[in-house]
Image: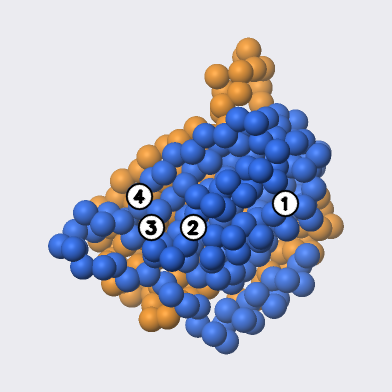
Chain colours: A orange, B blue
Amino acid sequence: MQALGRHLLVELHGCDPEALKSRDLIREIMVSAARVANATIVGVSFHEFSPFGISGMVVIAESHLSIHTWPEYRYAALDIFTCGDQLRPDTAAEFIRVKLKCKNASLVEVRRGLIARNGKRLSHKVSPLPEKAAHAYEELSMAY
Amino acid sequence: MQALGRHLLVELHGCDPEALKSRDLIREIMVSAARVANATIVGVSFHEFSPFGISGMVVIAESHLSIHTWPEYRYAALDIFTCGDQLRPDTAAEFIRVKLKCKNASLVEVRRGLIARNGKRLSHKVSPLPEKAAHAYEELSMAY
């Protein structure tokens, strides 16, 4: 059985609460993490909530990264979903853990989309459709 | 132990491949599913890949919904991450399963952000900051 996707569910407890409150910082960390993972970014969306807390997603050609923060509990829920064998999701997870000064992290890896393929390599989404992706990323960037 | 978030990981095998190829349809289904779940939508980002396949995310005030489709395998990986007790993520998952004509679905629920709170109710992000969220959603809508 081969898997189409690799999904890391990362629990980040004991983080720096000030970092978890900053939309700009969280966005910067997540976008940098996508680059650290060797991913191709196609969409970015980060939002701040009342009284505090950030939710954000980075859509990548190889799936997504998402984060939800609860500064009051010094906790963030991080997901890194990738496909293909060119990415480094573990490195991205460690990058984010360090940036958030997380003291207690745990990680569960789930293999998504198990398919019987008898040893053949699985296809994955290697590149976004150029015009549409470029357009979308440009528009999304305006929302910062 | 109480959980800050409820995360459904849904494996959708045996879906209608034509549905899995259509960015407009997938976006419509996911946005409708967020409403079915009683969620507050704050950001939407959907992308089409070459040769085919859709990746998309709906950021909600209560966390997110995401989907990645592989039409060639009739498979989609769906995630529904919610917080608070006002949402109906199971109903949203079933809504999407039916819309994609999925024949073989499986679901794993993960409780995210376990916190010892001695019976007190946990806070969750009840509302986005009005100006920023409205602005962001407007900009994101332009990317359609």
Residue found 63% across the figure and 48% down from its top? B96
The chain carrying label 1 is B
Between residue B35 and residue B54, name the one nearer to us: B35
Q: Which quadrant holds residue A5?
A: top right
Residue found 50% across the figure and 50% down from its top? B90
CA distance for labels 4 and 2: 15 Å
Question: Mark 4: which secondary structure?
Answer: strand
Read off the residue under disc 1. Answer: B26
The location of residue A25, given as percent across then percent down, is 46, 71
Decide: marks 3, 4 in contact (CB < 8 A)? yes
Decide: marks 4, 2 in contact (CB < 8 A)? no
Read off the residue under disc 3. Answer: B5
The location of residue B58, given as percent across then percent down, is 61, 61
Left or right for A140, reference B127: right
Decide: marks 2, 1 in contact (CB < 8 A)? no
The chain carrying label 2 is B
The chain carrying label 4 is B
Q: Which quadrant holds residue A136?
A: bottom right
Amino acid carrying mark 4 in the image? Arg
Q: Earlier in the sequence, mark 3 or mark 4?
A: 3
Read off the residue under disc 2. Answer: B88
- Classify A115 as above or below B90: above
Question: Mark 2: which secondary structure?
Answer: loop
The chain carrying label 3 is B
**Discs 3, 1: same chain:** yes
Residue found 73% across the figure and 71% down from its top? B141
Read off the residue under disc 4. Answer: B111
Decide: marks 3, 2 in contact (CB < 8 A)? no
CA distance for labels 3 and 1: 25 Å
Question: Mark 1: which secondary structure?
Answer: helix
